[in-house]
C-alpha cells in the first residue's frame, strides 16, 4: 500500500464536507489557523454541536506534528474537557481476520438503533513499520459509515505506537465532547498495542477464534489476562461446536489467573458477527461490567489512574522530544554515538554526556566528552 493510499484511507471517515484538500500533498492539509476567525471557541462550539467536519479537523490538529497545530489542539482539548458526556470506552482486539470489523458493524448498528452515538477509533501498530495499515486497507464497516450517529476515524498513520496511542487517547476526549457516548477503540492483536489500548478504555474485549486446538498459543497470555471478556467469534454453522470447545478452554485458562481485585470475572462467550447470534450477549457483559464497576467505585478509579498514566506518558514523550531536538544534543549525538558503537565510550557515560549537554543547553565540555569511562 502506498503512502497516498494510506492517506486516503486515513481520511476515509470524512464523508462530511470541507475536508478534501489533504489528498493533494502539495496543499496544506492543516485546518484553519489558530488566530483565524474560526478559532478555538468556534471549534469547541461546533464540536459540541455535533459538527463532524469540525471534529475531524480538530483531530487532524491533534495528529499534526506542527507545533502551532499542537498548541491549538491543546487549547481545544482543554476547552472540551469541561463538556464531555458520560461514555463507555471499549477496546476491541483480535488477530487480523477474527472478525473485528464485522463485529463492530453488527454491534454498532444495534447500539445506534437503540439511540446511542458511536465513535469508532483505531490503533494500528502496523502503520509504523509498513507505512500501510492492517486496519485501514479495505473498505470496512460500510453500513456503519452511512449512519448519522457514527463517527469512524482510522488510526493515525504517523509516528510510534506511543505517539499514535496518545493521539487516540486525546481523540477519545474530543469525541466525548461531541456527544458520542460509546467509544470503540479497535486494535490488531499483535502484542504491544493491546497494553496501550488497555490503558485508555474501560472495558477490554478480546475476540478470538476456535480451531487448531491450541487457541491459547496464538494469543499472548498477557492479552488474555487483560481481557474483561473473551468472545469466540464465528460460532456459526459447522464451527459452532469448535467454538464451544474453545470457550471451555479459555474458561479453564482464565481460572489459572488470580481473581481480579475488582471482583469482575471475565466471561467467555461465543458469538457470530455474521449472523448476529450472541452479539447482544457480549454487549450485555459490557453493561453489567459498567454497572458493577460504577457501583463499587472502580470505574472512576480506573479512569483516574489512566489519566495519571497519560500525564506521565506525555511528560516522558515531551522530554524526549525536547532532548533530541535540542541543538546541544544534535551537535554531539553523531560523534558520541560513533564512539559508543566502536567501544571507545560506554553507553552509560555517553548518555550522561548527552544529558549534561542538554541540561546546560550548550555543547558538552570537552573534558567530559573525553571518554574516560569508569564503567
Ligand atoms: P478483521 O480483520 O478482524 O476486521 O476481520 P473481518 O471483520 O474483516 O472478517 C474477516 C473475515 O471473516 C471476513 O470474510 C468476514 O466475512 C468473516 N467473518 C467475520 N465474522 C464472522 C462470523 O461470525 N462468522 C463467519 N462465518 N465469518 C465471519
Image: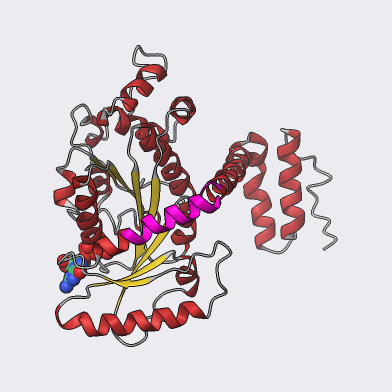
Q: Is residue 289 magenta?
A: yes
Residue occupying image coordinates x 14% and y 67%:
275
Q: Where is residue 347 in the image (x, y as percent from the top left)?
A: 71, 59
Q: Main secondary structure of the magenta part?
A: helix
Looking at this view, name the residue that lies furthest to the top.
37
Image coords of residue 331 (percent x, y):
64, 39
Outermost residue toward the bottom in this view: 213
Residue 200 against residue 72 in the figure, above or below? below
Please determine whether, in this image, residue 188 is positioned above or below residue 27: below
Residue 129 located within the stretch drawn in magenta? no
Nearer to me, 362 or 292: 292
The quarter of the image that holds ligand 1 is bottom left
Task: Please provide percent x and percent y for residue 157.
Answer: 35, 47
Residue at left 44%, top 39%? Answer: 170
| 189 horizontally vs 310: left or right | left
Task: Give the residue drawn at x 25%, y 70%.
Answer: 271
- Place of residue 295 in the rendered image (x, y in percent of width and height, measured from the top left): 50, 51
Q: Give the range drawn in magenta.
A: 284-300
Residue 199 seen in this snapshot: no
Residue closer to the observer: 254 or 9: 254
In the displayed structure image, the side of residue 104 where residue 64 appears, left or right: right
Amino acid at each position: 500500500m502506498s503512502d497516498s493510499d494510506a492517506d486516503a484511507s486515513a481520511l476515509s471517515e470524512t464523508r462530511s464536507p470541507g475536508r478534501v484538500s489533504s489528498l493533494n500533498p502539495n496543499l496544506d492539509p492543516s485546518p484553519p489557523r489558530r488566530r483565524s476567525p474560526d478559532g478555538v471557541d468556534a471549534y469547541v462550539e461546533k464540536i459540541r454541536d455535533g459538527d463532524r467536519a469540525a471534529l475531524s479537523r480538530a483531530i487532524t490538529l491533534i495528529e499534526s506534528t506542527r507545533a502551532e497545530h499542537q498548541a491549538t489542539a491543546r487549547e481545544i482539548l482543554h476547552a472540551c474537557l469541561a463538556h464531555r458526556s458520560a461514555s463507555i470506552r471499549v477496546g476491541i482486539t483480535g488477530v487480523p481476520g477474527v472478525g473485528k470489523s464485522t463485529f463492530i458493524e453488527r454491534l454498532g448498528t444495534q447500539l445506534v438503533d437503540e439511540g446511542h452515538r458511536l465513535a469508532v477509533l483505531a490503533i494500528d501498530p502496523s502503520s509504523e513499520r509498513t507505512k500501510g495499515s492492517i486496519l485501514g486497507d479495505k473498505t470496512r464497516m460500510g453500513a456503519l459509515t452511512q449512519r448519522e450517529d457514527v463517527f469512524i476515524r482510522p488510526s493515525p498513520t504517523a509516528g510510534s505506537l506511543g505517539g499514535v496511542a496518545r493521539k487516540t487517547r486525546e481523540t477519545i476526549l474530543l469525541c466525548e465532547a461531541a456527544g458520542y457516548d460509546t467509544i470503540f477503540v479497535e486494535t490488531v492483536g499483535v502484542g504491544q498495542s493491546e497494553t496501550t489500548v488497555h490503558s485508555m478504555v474501560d472495558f477490554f474485549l478480546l475476540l478470538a477464534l476456535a480451531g487448531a486446538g491450541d487457541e491459547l498459543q496464538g494469543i499472548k497470555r498477557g492479552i488474555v489476562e487483560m481481557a474483561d471478556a473473551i468472545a469466540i467469534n464465528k460460532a456459526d454453522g459447522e464451527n459452532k461446536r469448535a467454538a464451544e470447545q474453545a470457550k471451555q478452554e479459555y474458561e479453564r485458562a482464565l481460572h489459572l489467573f488470580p481473581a481480579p481485585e475488582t471482583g469482575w470475572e471475565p466471561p467467555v462467550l461465543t458469538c457470530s458477527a455474521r449472523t448476529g447470534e450472541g452479539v447482544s450477549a457480549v454487549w450485555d457483559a459490557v453493561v453489567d461490567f459498567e454497572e458493577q464497576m460504577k457501583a463499587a467505585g472502580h470505574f472512576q478509579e480506573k479512569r483516574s489512574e489512566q489519566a495519571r498514566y497519560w500525564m506521565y506518558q506525555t511528560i516522558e514523550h515531551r522530554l524526549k522530544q525536547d532532548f533530541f531536538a535540542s541543538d546541544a544534543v544534535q551537535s554531539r549525538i553523531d560523534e558520541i554515538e560513533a564512539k559508543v558503537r566502536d567501544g571507545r565510550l560506554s553507553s552509560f557515560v555517553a548518555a550522561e554526556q548527552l544529558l549534561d549537554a542538554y541540561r546546560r543547553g550548550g555543547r558538552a565540555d570537552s573534558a567530559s566528552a573525553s571518554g574516560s569511562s569508569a564503567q
